[in-house]
Image (cartoon, rainbow, N blue to C red):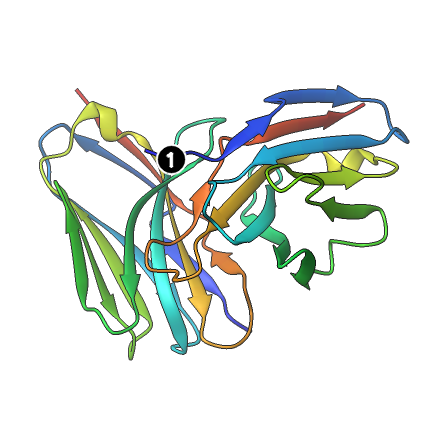
Amino acid sequence: KQEVTQIPAALSVPEGENLVLNCSFTDSAIYNLQWFRQDPGKGLTSLLLIQSSQREQTSGRLNASLDKSSGRSTLYIAASQPGDSATYLCAVKRVDSSYKLIFGSGTRLLVRP
Amino acid sequence: EPEVTQTPSHQVTQMGQEVILRCVPISNHLYFYWYRQILGQKVEFLVSFYNNEISEKSEIFDDQFSVERPDGSNFTLKIRSTKLEDSAMYFCASRDWTDNYGYTFGSGTRLTVV
């Protein structure tokens, strides 16, 4: 059974700092991995999608990497801003016939001005 | 940018009542999903829907739940007799046939059962 874990659960950093959020999964047989942002009481905004054949994806100040063999993904945020404050979720999709995403519990990020 | 639209944003209902949560997926998407998030917990899968039938459902998705795509654009989740523990944020999601762009989620419906 696929389990997805995110560490740390919460993170508080001063503005301008570079930071790394971690996501680990127990079954390396994944189809892809997707990072989302969730603002309090709001929906999920897709940030980056990494296919299983890819090692990383970049969008602006965000860079996500994937190491399937070790069951890990990281989300790197460069030059953090207060507007980056949110919960960041990772989710994996398995290679079998399952259609579902399996989510981690998220990292709650606070960027202090 | 195309969006998944969910209505209502917040619904309060009495225990035992039926509720219908509505979603308009992205127009050229073929796969549709409902997920839920109980306050403070993980986002969890409920059901997937493709080609007018359920593809997969979780243990949560019991006989009290049903989904429908009544008119080719809307995608609904019905809870027949709500319980207190159904209180959660319900998210609709869709994706295209390639899965090259991942899932697009709606902004959610917060369901409160009292």
Q: Indicate the amino acid at tag 1.
A: Pro
Q: Position of residue A5 (x, y in %)?
A: 42, 59
Q: In front here: B94 or A63?
A: B94
Classify residue B74 by image quadrant: top right
Left or right: residue A11 compared with residue B25: left
| Label 1 packing within 10 angstroms: few (<14), some (14-19), many (20+) | few
Residue B45 appears anywhere in the view: yes
Q: In front here: A42 or A22?
A: A42
Image quarter where the N terminus of chain B lies is: top left
Residue B39 appears anywhere in the view: no
Q: Position of residue A75 (x, y in %)?
A: 23, 52
Q: In front here: B60 or A12?
A: B60
Left or right: residue B6 compared with residue A89: right
Left or right: residue A48 compared with residue A6: left
Q: Is residue B46 above or below residue A111?
A: below
Q: Position of residue A28 (x, y in %)?
A: 38, 77
Image quarter where the C terminus of chain B lies is: top right
Q: Name the residue located 63 percent from the left edge and 21 percent from the top edge.
A: B10
Please, which chain is the residue tagged with disc 1 on?
Answer: B
Q: Name the residue located 59 percent from the left edge and 22 percent from the top edge.
A: B9
Q: Name the residue located 10 percent from the left edge and 36 percent from the top edge.
A: A17
Q: Position of residue B78 (x, y in %)?
A: 77, 39
> Element under label 1?
loop
- Residue annotated with mark 1: B2
Q: Is residue A68 above or below residue B45?
A: below
- The total number of labels drawn is 1
